[in-house]
Image (cartoon, rainbow, N blue to C red):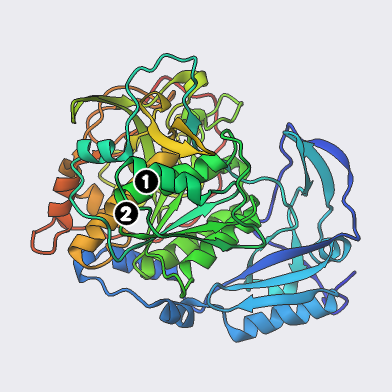
Amino acid sequence: MSDPAASSRIALAGSERTIPSNAVLEGVADRSETATVTITLRGKASSVAHAAKLAAIAPGKRSYLAREALGKEFGARASDIAAVEQFAAAANLTVVSKDPARRCVVLSGSVGALADAFGAELHTYRMDGSTFRGRKGALTLPASLAGIVTGVFGLDNRPQARAQFRRRKKAAPAAAASLTALQVAGAYAFPSGEGTGQTIALLELGGGYTATDLDTYFSGLGLSTPSVTSVSVDGAANAPTGNVDSADAEVLLDIEVAGAIAPGAKIVVYFAPNTDQGFLDAVTTIVHDTTNAPNLLSISWGGPESTWAAQSFTNFDAAFADAATIGMTVFVAAGDSGSSDGVDDGLAHVDFPASSPHVLACGGTELVLSGTAIASEVVWNGGTADGATGGGVSTAFGLPTWQGAAHVPPSVNAGAQVGRGVPDVAGDADPRSGYDVVVDGASNVIGGTSAVAPLWAGLVARLNAIVGKPLGFINPVLYANEAAFHDIVSGNNGAYSAGPGWDACSGLGTPNGASLLAVFDPAQPTAPVQPVEPVQPTAPAEPTKPKKPHR
């Protein structure tokens, strides 16, 4: 055993993983290869509980922590880091870095030493044209680390998330005209402004952008190119492929939509590897970035809850609670594959991290304009060819207090589990009424809930600038002010149908920016905000095939 000092070992709760059914075993992983893992640790106190208290206060009256104070109050204990360092030394592993504020320690070593240290059997698999190192079952740790370690990420480096964009097919007849981001903003009555003084973080797990594409796009809108910089996480970088069907489309869509709505904001693009380790490291890096200090985060990547380990639910949600504590608003695309979320098992699934109760989950519609006004708007559902908005009921998170009056239905799956409803809000996403963008030197029309997250980020950037203070976690306020939305009452995403009020395909609806400004302007009275109670991941219910469409 690589840790001879340990008298006993325990299973790490939430670390269980399975191998995808379409993955083909190739052999035992190369034990001589060097790899790194990110070990996440408990905090001195719970930022989830602190975020709950903040959520019960109107945004204009909240006191947010500075990033430095966040680390001091909710970061890892020095004694816990020391315990991990002692474990690493006994296991012949090297401490690459330790970050108390982010509650993590990064270890490096041979794959063999790492596998032995965490009781894992690592194999290589081939899936969708690429090879990854995978594992199944739970990890184990010395009993001395019980309660200290909350997750171990990096042993398994399978692709974890997918970009939530859909490019309009040239051969498909457009049901509605394509739109610019500014036309969508006009239709939704976004308040005037440029988001000056705001910083929008975009999280990307592949692809890249060029300055030429950005200059071409923004000059076409009559705008100056906004400030766009990139940050490398875990060795990833801005790396455009030149292929419009690659993650380049995601990166450019995010920058161009957010930048068009808030051209006065700074945009910082964080590139990370597409693994659970890279994704989480990117989130915590963004939240604790004292150099760029973003106050808005847009995420257009995710995957079905069933494809994640429970340790991801716990640690991502804690990071998003950290974000709420510093006044950051997080927007996440709800998915582009309907109520199944692309899982071919006949069941209903929701996308994560959109299902985290500390983010604003963004669903999709098909928007048709008459001039500058909305002629019609329905749930986006273009079928298998053109995708459909994600949405449904989480099996990982309980029902948040602020959704208590939204009439979130039980899951359509067996057991009728009650959980966090997805999405919270919506916006134009159907590729048939998609966004005119420039990707890899060419004009394209792209939709998907990927476009809705940066659209909302741009809207809140404008609101922040007008109000003069970050709005932070806004979900409770939105649910207390349903009249500030265009209610979407037609369409379905498969298992769930739209109807009056909140529903599991369009959420509260699409924004009326002028009404939202009246809600958040401190000079205007707002409806009482319901407090948020901490929610923890729960064991998934055993689902069955979706029933008829349900709100």
Relative to 301, say whether 91 is above or below.
below
Point 38% across, 30% down: residue = 434
Q: Is residue 419 visible?
A: no
Q: Which residue is mark 2?
A: 263
Secondary structure of the residue carrying numbered label 1: helix
Can you give x and y, in whole percent of width and height, for residue 358 in the image?
A: 40, 56
Judge left or right: residue 387 versus residue 153. Answer: left
Q: Where does the image place residue 58, in percent across and percent down from the top left?
A: 21, 64
Q: Residues within 10 Å of mark 2 (few under 14, many from 20)?
A: many
For residue 501, which quarter of the picture?
A: top left
Q: Residue type at mark 1?
A: Phe
Does residue 234 lie above or below 288 as drawn? above
Q: Which residue is mark 1?
A: 218
Q: Is residue 104 above or below residue 186?
A: below
Q: CA distance from mark 1 to mark 2?
A: 9 Å
Label 2 secondary element: loop
State the residue at coordinates (21%, 67%): 468
Q: Are marks 1 and 2 in contact (CB under 8 Å)?
A: yes
Percent coordinates x, y for residue 255 in the rendering: 43, 49
Q: Residue 422 in the image: state x and y as whole percent.
A: 40, 41
